[in-house]
Image: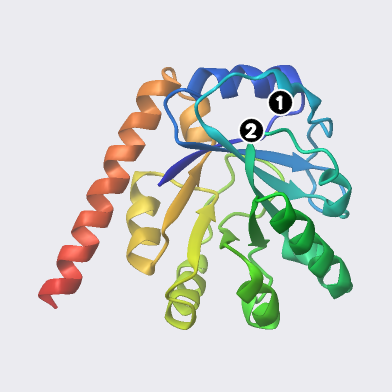
Amino acid sequence: MVIPGIFEETTEQAAQEIVLIGNLATKIQLDIADGLMVDGKTFLDLSFLFDLQIKAEIQLHLMVQKPESFLIALPPVIKDVCAQAEAFMYNPICMESYNDVLKAKNIRVGLSFNPQTPFEDFEDCIKQCDYVQFMTINPGAQGRPFLMESLDKIARFKEKYPNVRLQVDGGISTETMRMVVKAGADDVVVGSQIFRSSNPAQTYQDFVLQFENARTNFFHSRKSS
């Protein structure tokens, strides 16, 4: 699946982009950054999501030090929540609470890893998650370059956890999409390549086609090998 990713400073900018793509995409990732977990910062108020009328589900990506503070009153359009593993690194009890609260709300639980964070240190947490995300850029802003060393990390994860859904976020282009799909990614988050284009709706659809072709070619190559 191709998931459009939104990283904006204001709710007005985010709402415009959500409406622009919200009846085309199946799922949209909305980044929330507190300026402490990563060097970028977005709005922190989610109340505007209560009024949005779109077909797409919202996946919340919490790049914040205290993800639990965002779970009290989640708008119904949010169906997935993905927090940074680094937020729980020194407080595993918070991870348990995070998981329990989301499961009680019937919201899918995700865990996102920065490029430098080894997933091997979070085996118990991964087993509790519905999906895992790898950041394939240094997080904090869109448009940063793809980190090629992420490919080995993706492959190692899928070898160890073949049944855990893995999505990648950052630096996805036509070329890098083929690479991450071949390495084992199930979903890709695409941000600036879509929303900074002259026609975001068409660009999204182009990425969907490219993703489907990459997946088809990958499975055909596996069968023939």
User: Residue at coordinates 85% horizontally, 53% vertically from top-left?
Assistant: 68
Given the image, on which type of amino acid does mark 1 rest?
Answer: Leu
Can you tell which quarter of the image residue 94 is in? bottom right
Kind of element beneath mark 1: helix
Q: Are marks 1 and 2 in contact (CB under 8 Å)?
A: yes
Tell me where residue 150 appears, x and y as whole percent.
Answer: 52, 66
Q: Can the viewer see residue 77? A: yes
Tell me where residue 140 appears, x and y as whole percent.
Answer: 72, 46
User: Residue at coordinates 87% horizontally, 55% vertically from top-left?
Assistant: 65
Q: In this view, does 126 lie to the left or right of 173?
A: right
Q: In this view, does 178 lie to the left or right of 89?
A: left
Label 1 environment density (alpha carbons within 10 Å; few <14, some 14–19, many ≥20): some
Tell me where residue 51 appears, x and y as whole percent.
Answer: 70, 18
Q: Depth check: give the residue in front, 114 or 128.
A: 128
Q: Which quadrant of the rendered structure holds the C terminus?
A: bottom left
Q: What residue is disc 2 on? A: 77
User: Residue at coordinates 58% horizontally, 24% vertically from top-left?
Assistant: 18
Q: Is residue 6 left or right of residue 146?
A: right
Q: What residue is disc 1 on? A: 49
Residue at the limit of the structure toward the left, as seen here: 224
Mark 1 vs mark 2: which is more N-terminal? 1
Label 2 environment density (alpha carbons within 10 Å; few <14, some 14–19, many ≥20): some
Position of residue 126 relative to residue 82, above or below, is: below
Q: In this view, does 34 lie to the left or right of 80?
A: right
Can you tell which quarter of the image residue 98 is in? bottom right
